[in-house]
Amino acid sequence: MATAQKSQENRFLAFANLFKGYMGVMPIITAALAPLLTAMNVVPTYASQRKPLATVAGVLGFLLVAWLFYVRRTIALGSIKRRIRVFFNLCPIVLILGAIICYVAYSNTLDTSVKEAAQPPVTRSQALGEWSKEHDVPNSVQLQLLYLGMFLFCEASFVMMALREYANDVRGISEYEWMFGAQDGSPVTAPSPPSGVVLPVVTEMQPVEKA
């Protein structure tokens, strides 16, 4: 029985630690991927915009991570206040939807722009390539804003979720307490975990008395 409980505890802690580590590193990965994916032209862009977008996406990505960490107190306190925590709970999914909307709008705007640019004898690939370096790109500003929005919204969503986990670690809240407790900053009064769920107990180290 003890062996089964220990195994269940290990699986639970492994999942929690893996997920927290994943959430913590993904904002940095997203910020680093944005310029890399742009330079690789994974999402089609005009050649004249590729290098500026790669540079701006990287810089703004890291600045966004820094700013959200800068206001982490507001996010942490807002996440446990009754009247406004619903906003912080919904904020990540709203940001994800914003990224999807930006992508769809970018694709449609790019198609419209290329149709205007790719007049015979210019082909689509030529319009996206060398042609854009010699001519004005239709809907240029709108395309760049939507492109940046795809990455920045995704990154902001990751950071918001990672900061929630960071705040719980700072408060010393266990996974069971967070899922079944009051979640309003009050002293935890959650019921004891069910049989078979063993939570780690962190004790303070006592100073060693000299003989």
Image (cartoon, rainbow, N blue to C red):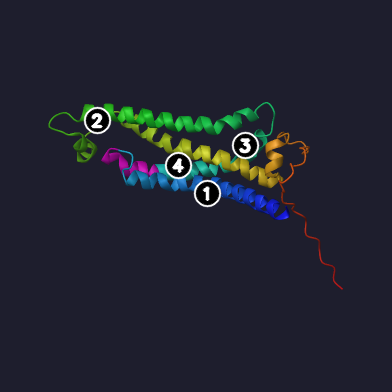
Q: Amino acid at mark 3?
A: Ile
Give the Cα separation between the discs numbered 4 and 1.
17 Å
Left or right relative to 136: residue 3? right
Q: Amino acid at mark 1?
A: Val
Percent coordinates x, y for residue 40 in the rendering: 32, 46
**The magenta segment:** 45-56
Within the magenta stretch, is there residue 44?
no
Which one is in front, 85 or 180?
180
Give the Cα separation between the discs numbered 4 and 3.
20 Å
The residue under label 4 is: 60
Left or right relative to 144: residue 177? right
User: Could you say which disc has been placed on residue 75 in the image?
Assistant: 3
Mark 1 or 3, nearer chain start? 1
Q: Quadrant of residue 72?
A: top right
Q: Quadrant of residue 121?
A: top left
- Give the farthest residue toward the left: 121
**Is there CB contact under 8 Å for labels 2 and 3?**
no
Q: Amino acid at mark 2?
A: Val
Local packing at callout 1 (Cα closer than 10 Å; few below 14, some 14-19, many 20+) is few
Dot 2: what SS? helix
**Is there CB contact under 8 Å for labels 1 and 2?**
no
Dot 3: what SS? helix
Image point (72%, 46%), residue name: 196
Mark 2 or 3, nearer chain start? 3
User: Could you say which disc has been placed on residue 25 in the image?
Assistant: 1
Give the Cα separation between the discs numbered 2 and 3.
41 Å
Q: Nearer the viewer, mark 4 or mark 3?
A: 3
Which one is in front, 170 or 70?
170
User: Could you say which disc has been placed on residue 114 in the image?
Assistant: 2
